[in-house]
Image (cartoon, rainbow, N blue to C red):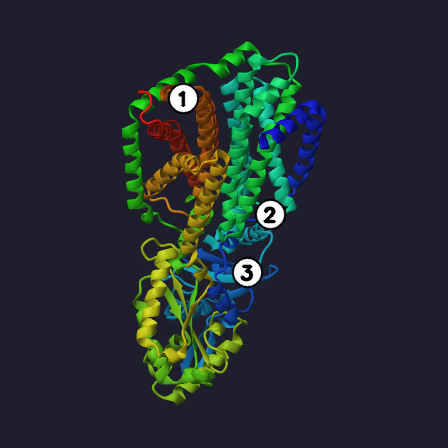
């Protein structure tokens, strides 16, 4: 029934070839108009799915604004404490603070210090007037206070006294480039005095957009050039270059146009969609053209032979595109919005290319004169055909060793696949030599970075002034001492640490006061500090006004790699903190560990689950489709063997070369499954046809490989070569994606031409009771 429908559509497209060609061109122009309007989403934080538990706690303590932008500026100099330099730094801070939506969180000039005068503590600004020093006396006082304060060290000034920093935050930003242009203009003058470093979500998102805008035209151009070369090398015909290229370009425009209409944006993930569609879509035209040139020897005055040629491979094209679409749509089972959008967009592009290959391409070919004899001979003979004959004999001869080789791959896979890593550090996406990474490394090394974790305690029954009780504070102090000994905690601050500082000013002892009266006195000074600092800064988040809530704020970082903590190492730190809490803190205080950086905590497990769900979902659906198409569950399983072999080898290589799954490469298996089964379907369809023509397995294999070998090699070469173009991307995960899918498909092709024929030969002999000898 399906064949009849396709056949009728083919006849229709040939009868109305001119209107179909015109309609296709017009639709391409319309969708191209929408494609030009597609926006780039460079927000790297938006890749992180929300964790319900962490999100709930953040809302509890900080309100509904979950995705907050942050920005750090640090300046370094040997002669850091200079009136001229500090004035320049202050000016830059004020100008950045004046940008729309920005809020200053912390800077060295507005910090508060305390000084003992007689028996009293006096509240003093770290810098006179909360500004940069104007005189040498003010400069020396500021320097001594800043370097002599235990709290400011590692907070706004580095241990070596060479780096000062300021921290800002803002609500969601739409135009990262504009903000970074403004910031770069502001810090331009600073470079006359300092080495300037800027980092945070805003610089990373701005750099992301820059690289995306740079990669997009390069990847598309390289994909088109490769397709042109491939078609020329394969067919050496103008029509075999222009028309198939038109198919994939129009299919890609349709996909981009629909992305715009559906409100999707280009992200670090979906940037690979256009070159992927260009590459994958070309394989369908190769099948059509191969059969077009093969059947052209039967051409006559009418064009009905074109219908016969396309009809001969339409099932292959339809099944191949259906399985590829299933592979992409399986990404809907993942948790990340961007991955789902990529799956939908790529599916639209693949379906469009398949549709255009079957209906637009034949219509356009029918308007041209019939191929010459040279092109006919190239399609029906040549070195590839002879190589396939030799390959069929080799497969029959070594079919048993081939099965042993497959068994060895399965065993190695089962021993290694659990060791594949998952990582969510988006900073690894960027080139190591890029400025955004260089600045990031300096800020991590000198100041511990900008990620923050909070531990909040709540007074039993919300008892007022509960956290002024010296016994409670000492209990928390024991816990804080454990935190300070952890090398992966760069800095921590709390009300009790400030209280100990104030007590040292009063009594000379850096400890929690024993007398409640002194604690009450010092708490009033602390309340004064809260009133004199800007709303919602670091200090105001440490305790609330009635001392029923108490928070420890800390900065975690990887002390060995000098990078931020992610995945297992972050989880290990949280587990250690939780263990210390259980051993030290009364459970009635209900300690909660929270912070925006903890959204990365469950991401590794999420990536792992997403990858497995998408892979199993796509394999299950493809098995059903293949089994229905072949009317045999066994044939459906056979079609999966080369693809599964390729994926197993991919996992093994990832373990050997320590390549982790991340937010982009988790799509590798699903994409490889959808694409990798195409060649198997093509070969199995031909094998079943040849079974009806021959009773000898050697002839069945030989003819099957002779007919399918060339298009399989051409389509595989086009896909592998096209995907290797992704190695020119600026983003490491995209490079890995291209390499991993290419490797999977290269091994899948080998499996299709060697392993699958060996299995089919053994199965044929079993079914025939031994059959003919090879």
Expressed as whole percent of the image width and height from the top left, the position of residue 635 reads 43, 34
Q: CA distance from mark 2 to mark 1?
A: 48 Å
Residue density around tag 1, few if under 14, some if 14–19, many if 20 or more, within 10 Å: many
Q: Are marks 1 and 3 in contact (CB under 8 Å)?
A: no
Residue density around tag 3, few if under 14, some if 14–19, many if 20 or more, within 10 Å: some
Q: Nearer the viewer, residue 516 or 377?
A: 377
Q: Return the residue at label 1.
A: 700
Mark nearest the camera among 2 and 1 is 1
Question: Where is 527 relative to 726, above or below?
Answer: below
- Residue at 33% across / 73% down in the picture? 582
Q: Secondary structure at mark 1?
A: helix
In the picture, measured across the screen, residue 735 lies left or right of residue 102, that is left
- Residue extending furthest toward the right: 19
Mark nearest the camera among 3 and 2 is 2
Q: Return the residue at label 2.
A: 264
Expressed as whole percent of the image width and height from the top left, the position of residue 49 reads 49, 56
Q: CA distance from mark 1 to mark 3?
A: 81 Å
Residue density around tag 2, few if under 14, some if 14–19, many if 20 or more, within 10 Å: many
- Residue extending furthest toward the top: 373
Q: Is residue 340 visible?
A: yes
Question: Where is 276 relative to 507, above or below?
Answer: above
Q: Nearer the viewer, residue 201 or 293?
A: 293
Who comes first in sequence, dot 1 or dot 3? 3
- Residue at 37% across / 82% down in the picture? 472
Q: Quadrant of residue 433?
A: top left
Which quarter of the rendered picture does the C terminus lie within? Answer: top left
């Amino acid at each position: 029934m399906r064949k009849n429908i396709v056949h009728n559509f083919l006849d229709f497209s040939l009868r109305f070839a001119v209107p179909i060609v015109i309609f296709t061109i017009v639709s391409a122009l319309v969708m191209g108009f929408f494609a030009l309007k597609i926006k780039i989403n460079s927000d790297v934080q938006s890749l992180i799915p929300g964790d319900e538990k962490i999100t709930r706690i953040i809302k509890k303590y900080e309100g509904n604004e979950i995705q907050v932008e942050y920005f750090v500026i640090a300046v370094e100099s040997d002669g850091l404490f200079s009136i001229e330099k500090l004035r320049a730094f202050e000016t830059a801070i004020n100008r950045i603070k004046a940008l729309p939506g920005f809020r200053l969180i912390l800077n060295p000039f507005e910090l508060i210090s305390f000084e003992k005068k007689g028996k009293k503590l006096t509240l003093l600004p770290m810098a006179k007037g909360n500004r940069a020093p104007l005189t040498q006396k003010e400069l020396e006082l500021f320097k001594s206070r800043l370097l002599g304060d235990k709290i400011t060290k590692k907070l706004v000034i580095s241990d070596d006294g060479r780096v000062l920093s300021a921290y800002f935050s803002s609500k969601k930003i739409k135009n990262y480039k504009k903000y970074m242009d403004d910031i770069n203009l502001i810090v331009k003058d600073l470079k006359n005095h300092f080495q300037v470093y800027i980092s945070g979500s805003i610089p990373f998102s701005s750099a992301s957009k820059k690289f995306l805008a740079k990669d997009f035209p390069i990847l598309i151009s390289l994909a088109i050039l490769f397709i042109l070369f491939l078609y020329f090398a394969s067919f050496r015909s103008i029509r075999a270059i222009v028309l198939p290229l038109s198919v994939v370009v129009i299919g890609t425009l349709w996909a981009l146009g629909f992305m715009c209409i559906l409100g999707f944006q280009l992200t670090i993930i979906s940037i690979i969609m256009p070159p992927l569609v260009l590459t994958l879509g070309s394989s369908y035209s190769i099948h059509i053209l191969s059969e077009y040139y093969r059947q052209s020897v039967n051409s006559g005055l009418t064009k009905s032979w074109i219908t016969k040629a396309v009809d001969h491979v339409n099932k292959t094209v339809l099944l191949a595109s259906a399985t590829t679409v299933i592979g992409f749509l399986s990404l809907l089972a993942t948790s990340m919005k961007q991955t789902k959008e990529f799956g939908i967009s790529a599916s639209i592009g693949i379906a469009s290319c398949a549709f255009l290959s079957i209906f637009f391409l034949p219509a356009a070919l029918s308007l041209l004169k019939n191929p010459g004899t040279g092109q006919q001979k190239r399609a029906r003979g040549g070195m590839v055909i002879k190589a396939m004959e030799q390959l069929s004999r080799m497969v029959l001869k070594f079919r048993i060793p081939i099965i042993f080789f497959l068994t060895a791959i399965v065993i190695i896979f089962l021993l290694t696949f659990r060791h594949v890593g998952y990582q969510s550090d988006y900073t690894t996406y960027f080139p190591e030599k890029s400025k955004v990474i260089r600045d990031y490394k300096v800020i991590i090394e000198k100041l511990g970075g900008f990620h923050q974790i909070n531990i909040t305690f709540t007074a039993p029954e919300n008892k007022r002034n509960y956290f002024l009780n010296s016994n409670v504070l000492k209990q928390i102090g024991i816990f804080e001492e454990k935190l300070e000994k952890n090398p992966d905690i760069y800095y921590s601050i709390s009300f009790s640490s400030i209280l100990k500082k104030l007590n040292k000013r009063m009594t000379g002892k850096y400890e929690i006061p024993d007398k409640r009266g002194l604690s009450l006195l010092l708490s009033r000074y602390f309340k004064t500090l809260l009133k004199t600092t800007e709303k919602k800064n670091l200090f105001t988040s440490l305790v609330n006004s009635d001392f029923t809530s108490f928070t420890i704020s800390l900065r975690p970082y990887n002390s060995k790699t000098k990078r931020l903590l992610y995945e297992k190492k972050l989880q290990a730190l949280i587990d250690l903190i939780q263990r210390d809490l259980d051993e030290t803190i009364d459970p009635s205080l209900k300690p909660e560990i929270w912070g925006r950086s903890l959204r990365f905590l469950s991401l590794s497990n999420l990536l792992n689950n997403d990858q497995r769900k998408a892979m199993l979902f796509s394999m299950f659906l493809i098995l059903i489709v293949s089994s229905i198409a072949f009317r045999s569950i066994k044939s459906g399983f056979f079609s999966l063997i080369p693809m599964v072999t390729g994926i197993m080898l991919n996992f093994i290589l990832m373990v050997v070369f320590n390549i982790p799954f991340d937010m982009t490469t988790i799509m590798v298996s699903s994409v490889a499954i959808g694409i990798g089964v195409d060649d198997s379907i093509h070969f199995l369809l031909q094998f079943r046809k040849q079974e009806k023509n021959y009773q000898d397995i050697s002839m069945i294999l030989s003819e099957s490989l002779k007919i399918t070998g060339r298009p399989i090699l051409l389509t595989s070469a086009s896909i592998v070569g096209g995907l290797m173009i992704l190695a020119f991307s600026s983003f490491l995960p995209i490079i890995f994606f291209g390499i991993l899918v290419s490797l999977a498909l290269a091994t899948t092709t080998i499996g299709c031409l060697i392993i699958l024929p060996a299995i089919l030969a053994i199965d044929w002999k079993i079914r025939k009771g031994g059959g003919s000898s090879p």
